[in-house]
Image (cartoon, helix red, strand yellow):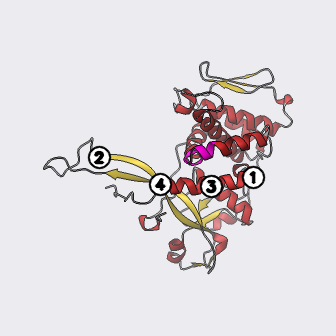
Amino acid sequence: MMKTLSTNNNINDVYSQVTNFVMEQLEKGIIIWRKGWNSKGFPKNIITGKPYRGWNVFFLNFITHLKGYATPYFLTFKQAQAKGGHIRKGEKGMRIVYWAKIENKEETGTDPAPTEESRRVRLVPRQYIVFNIAQAENIPLPENTEQPQIAIDSLAACDQIVTNMPDAPEIRYQGDSAWYSPARDLVNIPEKQLFKSTEEHYCTLFHELAHSTGHTSRLNRKELITSDGYGGELYSKEELTAELTAAFLCAVGGIEQGNTLINSAAYIQGWLQSFKNDKTMIIKAAAQAQKAADYILNRIAEEIETPPVKELIEV
């Protein structure tokens, strides 16, 4: 049976804390989702082995990079205690976002049983705190995390991502601009030799394929379907979703996204303004990007790390 959670904590604070952090970095010229990815893979909970997803993937990867942690493995304070270890005194944890299911129940008349109408389930953001394994003591790394990484042909891996996308749009290599047409379900991209590097080619192609996942025949994403034009709220969120999706796919393919973003300064200023106008934008776009990446990779959403209710914090 689903547990009913209180909605007393301020949801807007969760959005604001995340958005303010991103804005602080952007004002320094740092695009956190464009930082390199750890050779050990994506951030995951070291105890359960479950990967983090959405916003948490980009945030924890950035923290791993920023702090110089050897691995992107995290755990909660209570998980460390349960394993007979502990978080070192003075260490500060990272607040990450968990989408909690909230069930509203209302009594109707004399019948206490909630009706179909009165029982509504929605997802709201909560936060909980995690620490990198480097901040803990007496918590050994599982044996499989010590295995050497197998070298892969990153460009071949990127090509495989494109080839294996299910129900893919038509891809046409023509002209000198990249775009996606929802009406024609067509991705247009210049020939590889017109890009400064093959990596830049795939980054751009991933971006346009991300847009195509919003088509009505796929994820039916309103930001794409009902776009309000360049500079609009929906347009900005769709562009951010595609940007985050491309970053994730570049990491899966083993290539650096680097500074392939054209006119980065202009993009950064645009994002800063968008984030000021909508504090929910980065978290929601990251969730949409995860769905888009899952679709392109033709995989069912992985089970995510779900914190115990007692580990959720009021903000």
First-in-chain label (3 vs 2): 3
Q: Are marks 3 and 4 in contact (CB under 8 Å)?
A: no
Q: Which residue is drawn at 37% across and 58% down?
A: 5
Give the amino acid type for the residue marked by disc 4 in the picture. Ile
First-in-chain label (4 vs 2): 4
Give the amino acid type for the residue marked by disc 2 in the picture. Arg
Q: Are marks 3 and 2 in contact (CB under 8 Å)?
A: no
Which label sits in the foreground, 4 or 2? 4
Q: Which residue is drawn at 39% across and 57% down?
A: 7
**Mark-to-mark CA distance, 4 and 2:** 20 Å
**Mark-to-mark CA distance, 3 and 2:** 34 Å
Element at badge 2? loop
**Mark-to-mark CA distance, 1 and 4:** 26 Å
Q: Main secondary structure of the magenta part?
A: helix
Give the amino acid type for the residue marked by disc 1 in the picture. Ile
First-in-chain label (1 vs 4): 4
Residue 188 vs 67, above or below: the answer is above
Q: Which residue is drawn at 66% across and 29% down?
A: 230
Q: Check disc 1 and report the residue beneath it.
A: 30
Q: Position of residue 188 (x, y in %)?
A: 72, 24
Q: Check disc 3 and report the residue beneath it.
A: 20
Marker disc for residue 11: 4
Q: Position of 287 compared to 107: left or right?
A: right
Residue 15 vs 46, above or below: the answer is above
Q: Where is residue 33 in the image (x, y as percent from the top left)?
A: 69, 50
Q: Are marks 2 and 1 in contact (CB under 8 Å)?
A: no
Q: Check disc 2 and report the residue beneath it.
A: 119
Which of the image's four quarters has the N terminus? bottom left
Q: Give the range drawn in magenta.
A: 274-283
Q: Does the magenta stretch include residue 279?
A: yes
